[in-house]
Image (cartoon, helix red, strand yellow):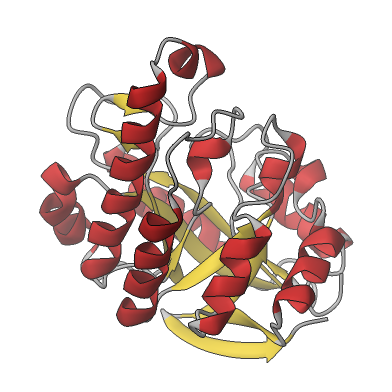
Amino acid sequence: MMGFASYHNHSVWSDGGDTLEAMLAACAAAGLDEAGLSDHYGFYPGPPQDWSMRRDRLPDYLATLGSLRGSYGPLQVRVGLEVDYFPETFEETREALSGVEADYLIGSVHFVGDFPVDAASSWWEALSRERIDEVWRTYFALIRAMAATRFFDFVGHLDLPKKYGYRPDADMSGEIMATLDALSAAGMAMEINTAGRHLPAGEVYPDPWILAEARRREVPILINADAHRAAHVTRSFDIAAGLAHAAGYTHLARYRRRERTAVPLP
């Protein structure tokens, strides 16, 4: 795994199953150059959600993760968050994170209104075909609105609604290309998220054709596992690298103190 970084990882501070220390130890054992934790942080416009870090724990999380720098040999430890975008609470989120010393912020959408996109297949089973199309359209509109804030560094799992295999009947190519245009205009990067290969979707996020369109727009990429267990921190990285090469990518993005650099794609 030399030449790779792993930035999208979760620990017991949000919905992960292992400690910060265990996740980073696994990244070091895999031979990664850099690794970051990105536990969930968001201002859900409703009751607190158990998958997200409590707001009052953020300073302790950042301090604990920061204190682990230099503890894993040559592994460079990065401090991140996966920040859920909700239009209703975005300004509150921005204010809460102003001045936070993170290396990167992942911008993600997990809810369309009160519909949890990735919670369980049963939520999708209850929808009509028309409603499934509507969820997909609204999801991409929210990603575009998130990009327009220019607050986030890269987008998480771009086509997440396919997680349980509920694809739209309507053609979403126009929505997707408009979303890639929005990412490009905002200077955001996009991850190849390998978690989808190990879920009903059966493939990485995003689809290979989306990756090719992103390359045409010169949207930078990262390769991440969206790991919730230490055993998964580099899962399917070889597959993702092959897809990146096939799409024409030659470099991967890295982040330090919210500044992006590029390294050769292994």
Q: Position of residue 76 (x, y in %)?
A: 67, 75
Task: Write the residue at 55% across / 18% down.
Answer: 121
Nearer to the camera, 27 or 237: 237
Residue 182: image quadrant is bottom left
Q: Is residue 23 above or below residue 211?
A: above
Left or right of residue 199: residue 148: left
Q: Quadrant of the N terminus?
A: bottom right
Closest to the observer, 237 or 33 = 237
Decide if residue 98 is on the left or right side of residue 232. left
Give the x, y percent position of residue 78.
56, 69
Q: Position of residue 195 (x, y in %)?
A: 68, 44
Q: Does residue 129 sit above or below 169 in this rendering? A: above
Look at 59% across and 80% down and name the residue there. Answer: 253
For image coordinates 63% across by 48% down, the residue present is 226
The answer to whether residue 191 is visible is yes
Q: Nearer the viewer, residue 7 or 141?
A: 141
Q: Residue furthest front?
A: 170
Quadrant of residue 16 in the image? Answer: top right
Image x and y of residue 56, in percent: 28, 41
Report the number of numbered marks: 0
Q: Could one spot residue 101 in this view of the protein? A: no
Would residue 244 appear left or right of 122 to someone viewing this image?
right
Q: Quadrant of the C terminus?
A: bottom right
The residue located at (20%, 52%) in the rendering is 93
Residue 124 against residue 22 in the figure, above or below: above
Question: Relative to residue 228, is residue 217 drawn left or right?
Answer: left
Q: Is residue 208 above or below residue 214?
A: above
